[in-house]
Amino acid sequence: MLRNLLCLFGLFASIASFAQAPGNVTANLRWWLKANEGVYTNNGFTAASDGQLVQQWSDQSLAFNHARQTNNTHKPVYRTNQINGYPSLHFAGDNFITALAAAGIAGNESFNFFIVLKQHSYLNTGTITDGYGTFIVDRATEVEQLMSLKIVDSNKFGYQKRNNAGGNLEGPQSATPAPIGTFSIVTFFRNYNSNYGIYIDGRLDVTTTNNVNDQINGPVIQLGRHAVNANQGLDGEIAEVIVYDDALTSAERKRIESYLAIKYGITLDQTTLTNYTRSNGNVIYPVASNASFAPYRYNIAGIGRDNNSDLIQSSSHSQNTSAVLQISNPSSLANNDWLVWGSNDGSMSSPNATDVDGNLVERRLARVWRIAETNNIGTVRVTVDLSSVPGPKVQSDLRLLIDRDGDGFSDNDIAPITGTLSGSLFTVSGVNLNNGDYITVGTINASDTPLPVELLSFDLSREDNFIISKWRTATETNNDFFTVERSHDGVTWEAIDTVKGSGNSLIERTYTSIDTDPYNGRSYYRIRQTDFDEKFTYSPVRSISIELPQRTLSFFPNPNLGKTFYMKSTIPINTESSVQIYDASAKRKYSIKPKQSRRGPDTYLLEVPEKLPPGMYFMSLKSAESVETRKVIVR
């Protein structure tokens, strides 16, 4: 008996001594789910394969608080190769998976909840004080205390909370729109007796100090859907979940965020420059602490190994749509070896013909990457996707350029390296990169492999309530036309104007486009340049803010008898505009085209095909520039 107890004690001591944790932050780790480990089709015996239903997602923390779903109707689906080579669990609105026990967060404790997720779409009907809309994280039953993550105010992340006594239903909501179609690192947190808030990709987006001493015990956590409301859930992917029942220090938070960012190729938000750190706290990409790295803060990614975090990353590229560089196949990857890079976000359609030697190399891309190496990972394979570079490309013309002495590429201090071209992928193997190197791609033949239209500038300005786009080219080759595109969030784009190009030109040319009906607030613009052979490339993105006269939206009478509504709106209405009517369960009932009313300017008639039964409804005006939702009552 004593021998058995000693063996059991030794087993637990062994587990504890080899415990791994995100960023090696081991203290107070209460939940750690990652889709690349511990995903089963049953209760922990058969590993899931691509496309299979998931019954258990095993907790990798020492709490062993697994998540489980035994009802096939509600099981999420395991999907491979969803982000930077890693899998995810797919949720389709009514799928969810629930922890076996509460996370062990006391009512007066702090906590941090990290989740790596992507949304394909979301419901826009929820508010911070109701049970409707897209729930990403909720509790298992409605009777438990509340700490949820959902979509509120049409398109924002909301951290919804309510105290143990059932009061103070509220919570912070993000200032930044929740992205669609890309993975993000979202963290909602409570620093007890101090504040609540939300981080997005490592940037503190919002905090509140309302009722900071509320007692809220951590519930049994449910991922993917509201506790009881059907189809009130995530339409998207979850790759990893991490929960701590403590307030993290800034250094601990950065270690966890850096682990997630490197693993999934998610660039941490650099609005305030932020270093990447490994699990011992040492900096592995000094974008904040080394001024020479600051310009290279875009599309940051890396490869490396950290045994304390259970991370071996041998191939990586940034998940940003504008990222084109992948580095892989290190010849040596020992624990705490790292190679991390970022770009200057230079245009892929604007070549540089001055910072080259002019004899061998005639042009290079304006896009340049900076390398940070910790220890020595040996040689690597470098692949650059040139699909966004217009014009022909000949393998024998292309070279990988390395500037090691920091004085530019004109002296070829490292001999330009040849590679292979497969489709649009230019690959160079066996490359020895050093800490501090700059790299880019050049051509030795500007005629056969010209490396694109040379864009000198692209600027935005405001005149009255118009936005003016102006851009200049130095040269143009095979240029058919430009398309001006705009976006309200930098993710979803629409074309607003087309401007004829100059074909082939060796002189400087200036182009202008005017947006006469811009979005209110901050907008994003870019130029898409299209060749005669239909190949295209994008300019860098520019943003501008404009405060337009306030626009209003209301539906009346409210309460209503359920048949005839009037809409008062200063939002522009056109043939594409429609009003969607949703019931309280977020099920769409009708889509109605507004008709101009005689009741006055900006007033429209809405005739419901069949009288609505009494209850609460949501009416959403979908226009070309936004979706606005209001609540109405039918008696």
Image (cartoon, rainbow, N blue to C red):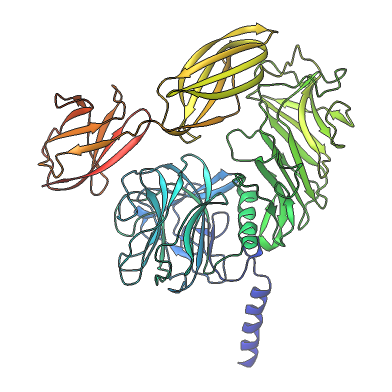
The image quadrant that residue 17 belongs to is bottom right
Image quadrant holding the N terminus, namely: bottom right
The reply, left or right, for residue 544 in relation to residue 142 is right
Nearer the observer, 585 or 571: 571
The percent coordinates of residue 66 (x first, y second) are: 48, 66
In the rendered view, would you say 601 is above or below 429?
above
- Residue name at image x 63 percent, y 84 percent: 9
The image quadrant that residue 82 belongs to is top right
- Residue name at image x 75 percent, y 39 percent: 370
Q: How many marks?
A: 0
Nearer the observer, 16 or 344: 344
The percent coordinates of residue 409 (x first, y second) are: 83, 28
Task: Tell me if residue 558 can be seen.
Answer: yes
The image quadrant that residue 422 belongs to is top right
Looking at the image, the residue that sits furthest to the front is 464
The reply, left or right, for residue 367 in relation to residue 465 is right
The percent coordinates of residue 569 (x first, y second) are: 26, 31
Nearer the observer, 411 or 375: 411
In the rendered view, would you say 252 is above or below 630?
below
Task: Tell me if residue 136 can be seen.
Answer: no
In the rendered view, would you say 346 is above or below 118?
above
The percent coordinates of residue 77 (x first, y second) are: 45, 50
